[in-house]
């Protein structure tokens, strides 16, 4: 059972204090009273109240002074001030000093209850935002989003700013970058989190059926419509509708979506009555909508309605510093029952891949390696050959091939040097080296013996 919400009432009028205590106690609050600013400050040093409700005019120090002094040691505690109708200027001055809100006397009980409830909700929201900021700073993650790069941290910060709004969001990025994860994070860290998040892939539903899926239909609207059906807009009412691959939506349906965004109403297919809906629209695409608009495949007016808040996710190859954290998350996801790790050599290979399929491709590689390997530590030999055999770029130096050309090496010398590099990479493990090189282990042994024989002959 959660702790009751705590309220400190500060007023020199005992009758007012008692009336307010009765009102809030009936609503389940834990209520304390103070007859002066001095007493209230002493009590607030001992208890971190959820809200302080104070009169402005009191003998000695006023409610405005209470606000200023309380903020020195209880900066997060919201203060609501009560004032007579003729003292509005004092209330405005108090809000400049840091008070959250004010109400005028005489007031209705519902007004003061609602004002205090809003103050508590706002404080809870601010504390949650601070917790999320600390979590991002500590772990490099935000919800299901993962990343250490500056680009991902900027996305985390932007989501925090806009999650509680209702403006449309357009997420862009290549396939596999995690656009739906961003959309879900927006929804579940915002004020609509308790309502539905409804994802729709615009390419997965035939154009002829997508309108019915989005807006619903009435019985008899078309062949096969044996009963009326709610649309996804209706199911997302109060929540978020995520339209993935919006760039593939046909022009006819684009115009109907635009009308919904303009009017806030939907009309089912075959129906003649519109219904109001409160839905936040989040869309995503891997297409260049500027190009699509120029070529007449996407409506410019719809684009500006959808692109109120743009979020772009860079490809994984542009943020390799995010790869270790992603790998760690994928290992924990696909091997929860057993602790598995990645060897430094394998990690280096993975960090230097182009990842055309972005995080989705990386997850596929990790899942496959975990399924096929029995090792507690995944090594280079557990990776697909196209990754295991790819040379690792050398930081600050020429590539192996360029160095070979510069030094005028023969093909045999280049081959031998590459074999040496791979053997060094695998710490002399010829089984692993042969697998990376794509040759039989016996062939590797024979080549090593021939090199040894040549070396002995040259020494003799």
Image (cartoon, rainbow, N blue to C red):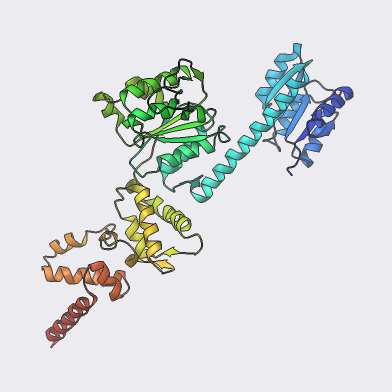
Q: Is residue 160 left or right of residue 49?
A: left
Q: Quick check: 412 above or below 54?
A: below
- Disc tally is 0
Q: From this viewpoint, is residue 62 visible?
A: yes
Residue depicted at x 14% and y 85%: 459
Of residues 272 and 162, the one nearer the viewer is 272
Q: Quadrant of residue 450?
A: bottom left
Q: From this viewpoint, is residue 154 visible?
A: no
Residue 61 x %, y %: 80, 26
Q: Is residue 35 left or right of residue 420?
A: right
Residue 451 x %, y %: 17, 79
Of residues 154 and 22, the one nearer the viewer is 22
Q: Quadrant of residue 53?
A: top right
Residue depicted at x 11% and y 68%: 411
Residue 360 x %, y %: 37, 49
Going by the picture, which residue comes out furthest to the bottom?
460
Of residues 400 and 203, the one nearer the viewer is 203
Q: Quick check: 262 above or below 436?
A: above
Q: Quick check: 22 above or below 374?
A: above
Going by the picture, which residue comes out furthest to the top?
86
> In the rendered view of the protein, which quadrant contains the C terminus?
bottom left
Residue depicted at x 36% and y 54%: 364
Q: Quick check: 316 above or below 347?
A: above
> In the rendered view of the protein, which quadrant contains the N terminus?
top right
Residue depicted at x 44% and y 68%: 376
Residue 379 x %, y %: 36, 66
């Amino acid at each position: 059972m959660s702790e009751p919400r705590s309220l400190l009432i500060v007023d020199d009028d005992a009758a007012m204090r008692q009336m307010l205590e009765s009102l809030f106690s009936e609503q389940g609050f834990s209520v304390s009273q103070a007859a002066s600013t001095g007493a209230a400050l002493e009590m607030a040093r001992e208890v971190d109240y959820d809200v302080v409700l104070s009169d402005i005019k009191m003998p000695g120090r006023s409610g405005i002074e209470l606000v200023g002094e309380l903020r020195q040691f209880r900066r997060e505690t919201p203060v609501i001030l009560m004032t007579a109708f003729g003292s509005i200027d004092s209330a405005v001055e108090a809000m400049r000093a840091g008070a959250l809100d004010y109400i005028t006397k005489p007031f209705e009980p519902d007004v003061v209850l609602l004002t205090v409830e809003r103050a508590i909700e706002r404080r809870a929201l601010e504390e949650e935002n601070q917790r999320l900021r600390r979590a991002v700073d500590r772990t490099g993650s935000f919800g299901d989003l993962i990343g250490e790069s500056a680009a991902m941290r900027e996305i985390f910060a932007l989501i925090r700013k806009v999650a509680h709004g209702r403006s449309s969001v357009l997420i862009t990025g290549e396939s596999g970058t995690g656009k739906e994860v961003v959309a879900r994070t927006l929804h579940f860290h915002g004020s609509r989190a308790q309502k539905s998040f409804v994802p729709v892939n615009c390419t997965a539903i035939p154009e002829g059926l997508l309108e019915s899926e989005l807006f619903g239909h009435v019985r008899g609207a078309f062949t096969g419509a044996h009963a009326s059906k709610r649309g996804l807009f209706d199911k997302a009412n109060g929540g978020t509708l995520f339209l993935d691959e919006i760039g593939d939506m046909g022009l006819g349906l684009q115009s109907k979506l635009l009308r919904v965004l303009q009017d806030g109403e939907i009309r089912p297919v075959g129906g003649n009555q519109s219904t109001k809906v409160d839905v936040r629209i989040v869309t995503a695409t891997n297409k260049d909508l500027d190009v699509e608009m120029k070529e007449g495949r996407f409506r410019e007016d719809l684009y500006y309605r959808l692109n109120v808040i743009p979020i772009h996710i860079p490809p994984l190859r542009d943020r390799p510093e995010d790869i270790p954290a992603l790998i760690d998350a994928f290992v924990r996801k696909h091997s929860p029952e057993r602790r598995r790790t990645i060897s430094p050599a394998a990690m280096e290979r993975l960090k230097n891949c182009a990842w055309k399929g972005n995080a989705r491709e990386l997850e596929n590689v990790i899942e496959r390696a975990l399924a096929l390997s029995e090792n507690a530590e995944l090594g280079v030999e557990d990776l697909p050959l196209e990754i295991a055999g790819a040379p690792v770029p050398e930081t600050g130096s020429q590539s192996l091939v360029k160095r070979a050309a510069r030094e005028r090496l023969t093909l045999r010398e280049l081959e031998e040097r590459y074999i040496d590099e791979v053997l060094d990479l695998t710490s002399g493990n010829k089984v692993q080296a042969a697998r990376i090189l794509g040759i039989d282990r016996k062939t590797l042994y024979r080549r090593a013996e021939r090199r040894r024989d040549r070396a002995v002959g040259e020494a003799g």
